[in-house]
Structures are given as structure tokens and as C-alpha cells.
Amino acid sequence: MRIAWLRLFILSIFLLSGASALDISVSVGNGLITSTAGNTYDQNTISVDQTIKANPVDGTLSNSLSGKGSLPGASRSITDAKGNYAIVYRYVKGSPDTTWTYQMSTGVDGTGVKAEEWLTVKKAYTITAWGYASNKEGDRAKASVTNSFTSPSASLTNWYTKVHADSSLTSAYQSADNAYAVMTYGMTPGKVVFITNAVNKETDYVEAYTSVAGGSVDKYRASAQSGARYARADISNLWASTWSTGGSIFQKMYARHMDDNKNSDISWVDLSIAGNSVYSKYVNTYPYSSTYPARAYSSKYYDKTYAMQSVYMKYNSEYVRSYALNYPYGSISKKLKGNKLGNSAWTSSKSKGVTAKTLA
């Protein structure tokens, strides 16, 4: 089988005024697979060096891009005849000193489709990027990151996402080597937020949520997936620090499923750390369960929800909380302070429970 590659090179385009746009689509098998790329640049985009590759055989469409200044919102998407859909997106509000590199790619992935993105940004006002996948059944998964500050100092290093959809499930994964949320005296801290979530047609919903203000996130790894019988979100690695007054770290694992249109079972665990000007504080996911350091899980099919995580908080920590609601049997919660903590919450078969304990 011959693979025909279409290459389009755009080298050092300098945009002094006005706007420029480039749109490309690839269809395969009489429209059974369609990949679409859209790029828009404006007067705040100083330079662009871009390579686009299209493979008409399997619908693969990818591009590599580097440049300076702002990067208006653009996406890559792919869909197939089965109703599987995947898309990635990025947006950067920058200054003349802002630099960025990224790559986006879409293609066939097993019996479904995928979309991927790699992104590094230095010295920006706002960074927004996400990946999203859905299938015909109604399963959906998404991974996103945002980072912003009042001056062009927000940074994101080696962020990566992959989203996948096939007829039986959807999944989303994201990772980052570093995300820097700057703190400047007398100004509101910058904030970086990672969200990874999934929902299925049975209304099982899970979310992993991490935010850091006036600090940084390192070695982040999170994933979520949804299928016919469950939805699940995991954080497999996280280091976070905040070193300034007004800074904070907040981490939450959340799971729920709906018994009907208005009643739900809910489990969540979270931790909160307030920053100060003296100490750095680190959150490291020590294995609370045998395999997964932090997990949220919901299954209406198996009638259960649960959430769990464990943390090591250096210096004076704030708290962890556990909460469970089992409708109509009431709710239960627990809160604990300490440096090495683990907590979990669950609901199942008309029961509920929470734990929060000091780890050995």
C-alpha cells in the first residue's frame, strides 16, 4: 500500500497587521474519516514557522508550529462513520516576549479515532489547552489546562494530551513537566488549573481537579475514561508548591451517579493548603491504595461511587476532607489536619462511608 504524504511548509511568516488564516481538511473513504485543521493568526502573532503533514490513506493530519507573540485559538479534529469524535485545542494570549512551540495530530486509533497535542509556552498572559472525545453512545472525556496572570509570566512546559473515542469508550490523558503560576507582591497570584473528567450515557461522572495559585505544578499525570458500565479518573503523579502569601493548593477527586433525574450518590475527597512567604509546600501522591494514588470512580451499573487519595504535605499543612452522600440515606463527612494524610469516601447499596487518617 502506497502512502501519499502531502507536505505544506510555511516558513517565517511575519504578520505585521491584519489577520491570516489557513484551513485544511482530509477525507478518507468517501467521507468515512474526516480530519480538519484550522489556524488563525492576528497582528499579535509576530512570527510562525509551521509544517503540516496530511496522510490521505488513514486520515492522519498533523502539524508542528513554533513562534512568538499571541496564538489565537485553533483546533484539530477527527470524526469517523461510527460517530467517534476527537479534538484538541490551544490558545495563547502573549506579548512580544512570549514564545511557544506545539504539535497537533489526529488519526485512526484501533477501532476508533484519536487526537493529540504537545505544547510548551513561556512568558504568556493566558494559556488554554484541552482535548475532548465523544462517541455515538454518549460517552465523553476531556482533559484541560489553563494558566493565567496579569503580566506575561505564565509558563507551561511539555504539556501533552491524548483523547480517544471508539464505540465502547472514551478516554482523556494529560501530563505536564511543569506549570508555573507566578506570584508578584501586591498582585493577585497567577493560577494554573488542571481538570480531567469523564461521563457516560448512564450519567456516571468523575473528575480530577488540581489548582495552584502563586506556585508551580510538576510531573503531573492524570487520566479519565468512560464506558458502558463506569467512569473513572486517576492522578498518577503530582508535585505542587506554593511559596507566597495569597498562594494556595487545592486538589479534589469527585465521583457521582444519578439514581434518577434529580437524585444522586456522591463521593469526593479533597485537600487544601494555604501558601505563605516562608515555606514551600509539596504535595506528593503516596500510594493510598495498592495501585492508584488518587482515583474517582462511579458506576450506576454496579451501584457504587468512591474517591480516594493520599498526600504528603511538607511543613504546616491545612486539611484533607472526605464526603459521601447516598440518597435518600443522608450524608457523612470527615476532616483532618496533618502532614501525611490519606482519605477516602464511598457509597454502595444504600450505604456510605468516609475515612481520613494519618499515614504511617
Image (cartoon, helix red, strand yellow):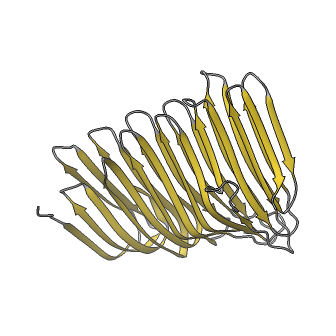
Residue 301 seen in the figure = yes
Dividing the picture into quarters, in which one does residue 350 lie?
top right
Q: Can you say whether 189 is above or below 141 in the image? A: below
User: Can you tell which quarter of the image residue 64 is in?
Assistant: bottom left
Front-most of residues 294 and 197: 294
Between 224 and 37, the residue placed more toward the observer is 224
Can residue 15 be seen at all in this image of the molecule?
no
* Residue at 67%, 41% in the rendered image: 306
Q: In x, y percent, where is residue 239? A: 68, 67
Q: Is residue 312 left or right of residue 181?
A: right
Q: Position of residue 110 (x, y in %)?
A: 31, 51
Q: Position of residue 60 (x, y in %)?
A: 27, 58
Judge left or right: residue 270 versus residue 35.
right
Position of residue 86 measured from the top left corner of the image (x, y, whole percent): 39, 48
Q: Residue at (57%, 30%) from the top-left corner?
A: 300
Q: What residue is rendered at 49% in x and 45% in y?
A: 141
Q: Nearer the viewer, residue 129 or 300?
A: 300
